[in-house]
Amino acid sequence: MISNAHLRPAWLGVSLYSVIALAALVALLSYASPSSWGSFFSDPYTWRVVRFSFMQASLSALLSILLAIPMASCLFHRRFWGRQTLLSLFAISMVVPTIVAILGIVVVYGRNGWFTALFGQPFPLYGLGGILIAHVFFNMPLAVRIILQAYDLIPDAQWRLASQLGFSRWRVFQLVEWHYLKKNLPGLFLLIFMLCFSGFAVVLSLGGGPRSSTLEVAIYQALRFEFDLNKASYLSLLQVVICSVVALAVYRFAPPVRQDVSLYQGGRLPLRSSKWTSGLDYGVLSVVLLWVLPPFVAILSPVFTELFWLSLLDSQLWRGLWHSVRIALPSGVLALLMGLSIAAIARAWRWHPRRNRWAVRLEQSGNLVLMVPSLVLATGLFLLFRHLGVSIKHAYWIVVWVNAVMALPFVLRAIMPVMYQQEKRFRQLYQQMNIVGWSRLRIEWRTIRPALAQGLAYAVLLSLGDLGVVALFGSKGLETLPMYLYQLIGSYRVEQGACVAVVLIGLCLVLFYGITRLLGGRRAVV
Amino acid sequence: MSFKSFALSATALLSCSLVSAQTLNVYTYDSFASEWGPGPKIKANFEAECGCELNFVTLDSSVGILSRVQLEGDASEADVLLGLDLNVMEAAKKSGLLAKHSVDTSAVTTPGGWDDSYFVPFDQGYFAFIYDSEKLDNPPASLKDVVENQDLKVIYQDPRTSTPGLGLLLWMKSVYGDQAADAWAKLADHTVTVTKGWYDGYSLFLKGEADVVLSYTTSPAYHIVAEGEHKYKAAESSEGFYPQIEVAAMLESAPNKALAEQFMQFILEPGFQNVVATGNWMYPVMENVNPLPEAFTSQPQPTKVLTLDAEQVAQNRQAWVNEWLEATTR
């Protein structure tokens, strides 16, 4: 039997997270007066925005995943020069500051961009096209990495069998790979959908006019320009409801999670590769490279300027870097601990006859926080702390905490599959030998550490790239690297800002590599 | 902890609290307080005068300043808000958080003079469309040219999320009045994109994505003084320019009211006014300043200044934003 006492630390972790999410929402909702919501509800523009956001977010998520599946398969089965570098780049695409990514994309697809130089006419960047280019740039690499993790869970025996039976790549995909991948896809789709549904700098900059907008524009306007907390809480609630409906729909059609036991060593045997599969590999590889690499080249190109090396002498840059790391590392660790707590409880419930249903819900609740705009979360907390009389002087810990909560969905995506798998593998042993609590972690450590490392790395990187939360609490000692970057761009210093972006990306790479190697061990996918 | 280190930290704590008794907290936006902005010089000049410590708390934007104190309410540790603009003044007043100042603003050079019991202006400028004179042979000479020339690629900012965007909204309203909706629709046909903030729009323009971008008449001065680049110019506007005036106010709940009052006085003195031109790339609001660099005086000087009544703006802003939305998403 599961002794509940041993789950107590995990419950602490879960409450740490749910308190913050719920309290922020409640604090804001306490300013709501639903009687006035009728007029907001009948605003036709809001619904047009919802329709547009729904469409662009679904398309972005679908496109990202459709490209990511064959890409992950190609990366898993083939070894080629630059593969490691590509995987590292994939890890950091989602933390490239929005404005920097937009400018990188403009250098490639803009009026005077490389595309125009190559084909003689400009790419129709502003509108849905530009939004999709940017969203896929941010999210497809993330999808590839998460799908690759699913590949790692395929038992060795299956590859051996497939190789012995002379299966082609396509047959293996149908009969083996798809079975493992499909479990991850609903969660992945939701993650990307929500990221694209809510973020708004990309949608406004590349959208070509107010026809392209998101609910968060209205939320931002209500909170910052009008200080209309009532309207802000209506809009946030609307966003939460829409995202929840999408989440319910996605999980309704999702295959039930049935984890398989495996003992993998990572050894792979050759599979029969036909002209078709090779062609597909090369095709997908070129599409993905053409999509992701040129903007990266544009973003990293300041390295070759003198200004870049001069800006390295800037003491403010190093101060910003220090503040960023000081926030990102603890908040990454906190996010991982919260993620582990959720995982510990969810998997204890998973094979429990009555609590089974709740396992998925608990896991999904980790995603809930993505539906609430970070500005709303931060504002709600601000109000809450004011009610409680806590001074904003302690903003450092608030920022660390909020960032940790915001990173939770990414951590969960990274660690949940392997956590479930290990539970199933050792469950009977645990019960017979009465092994509980941390001892389980020690037994599983060798197999789960790559996933933990990846989760931690994502959380650290996300918090490194954060702007929204820090900006609202802005105070001394919190001037992070992204804030410095926006400060530079905000006072005409676009070129210098681009140099800071390169430093930020460099820092992300170093941290990602360091974390995955130190915590993940040699087996980790870097 | 040894006794020695305990004693040391106790003294440190004590001296901290002594210093904080004389600290003036000024909320401002980030680029104002940045090391290349006017902040550091103003801090040095004021500290030399008051024998206190001036502490800038930086927020992400000028609206960020107001929403931060609205969130904090009476508990705010801010003494002075520096960097609100003309268009959020009404909202700021209505919050009931501001205190009246006693600064003599009769010598202020803002268009039409200055008379407001809550706010003291600290710099001014005009919204304008900026173009690259090496690429655009036929620059617009009026707002009407910008709106009607269908070949002109335009980038401007969203009035829902940015100050210049709101400025353009009022500029259009004061030029077109009831015809504003049609004008917006015409402009929408050759608008490249409408960005979230000033910086995204301006950086897209610098990358060559548009012929003109909404910014300030003083933007070319930055390129001349800081980069020696003369090709960027502000387009003329025969209908007149719409002003941007940045203001400061002190809080009713200011922990350090006497210092706050002293700082409000200081805003109009040379120690502050001399710094704003090349620090914040805006015009000073007093005449008692050092002569401006030529880069400033060579920019188009408005022959006519358009303004809308602040109360009218506050009342109609939402309706005008809706009008803009309706017209541009038709």
Image (spheres, rainbow, N blue to C red):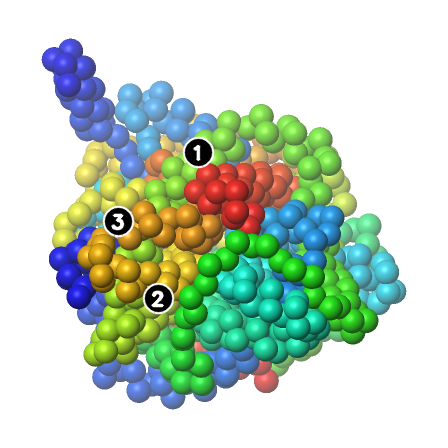
- Can see residue B179? no
Residue A424 tag number: 2
Residue at numbered disc 3: A439
Residue B55, placed above or below residue A336: above
Where in the figure is residue B200, as x and y percent of width and height?
59, 55
Give the Cα distance between marks 1 and 3: 36 Å
Task: Indicate the amino acid at tag 3.
Answer: Ser
Task: Return the chain for callout 3.
Answer: A
- At 73% across and 68% down in the image, what residue appears? A272
Q: Could you tell me which secondary element the residue under label 3 belongs to?
A: helix
Q: Amino acid at mark 1?
A: Trp
Point out the image quarter for the N terminus of chain A: bottom left
Pointer 1 residue: A322
Q: Position of residue A268 (x, y in %)?
A: 62, 58
Q: Is residue A256 left or right of residue A395?
A: right
Q: Position of residue A486 (x, y in %)?
A: 52, 46
Q: Earlier in the sequence, mark 1 or mark 3?
A: 1
Three-letter code for the amino acid on which mark 2 is drawn:
Lys
- For label 2, the crowd category at 10 Å Cα-Cα, with few meaning under 14, some 14 to 19 and many 20 or more, is some
Q: Identify the residue at image location x=25%, y=70%.
A: A349
Tell me what residue is drawn at x 40 percent, y 80 percent: A256
Q: Label 1: chain? A: A
Earlier in the chain: of badge 2 and badge 1, it is 1
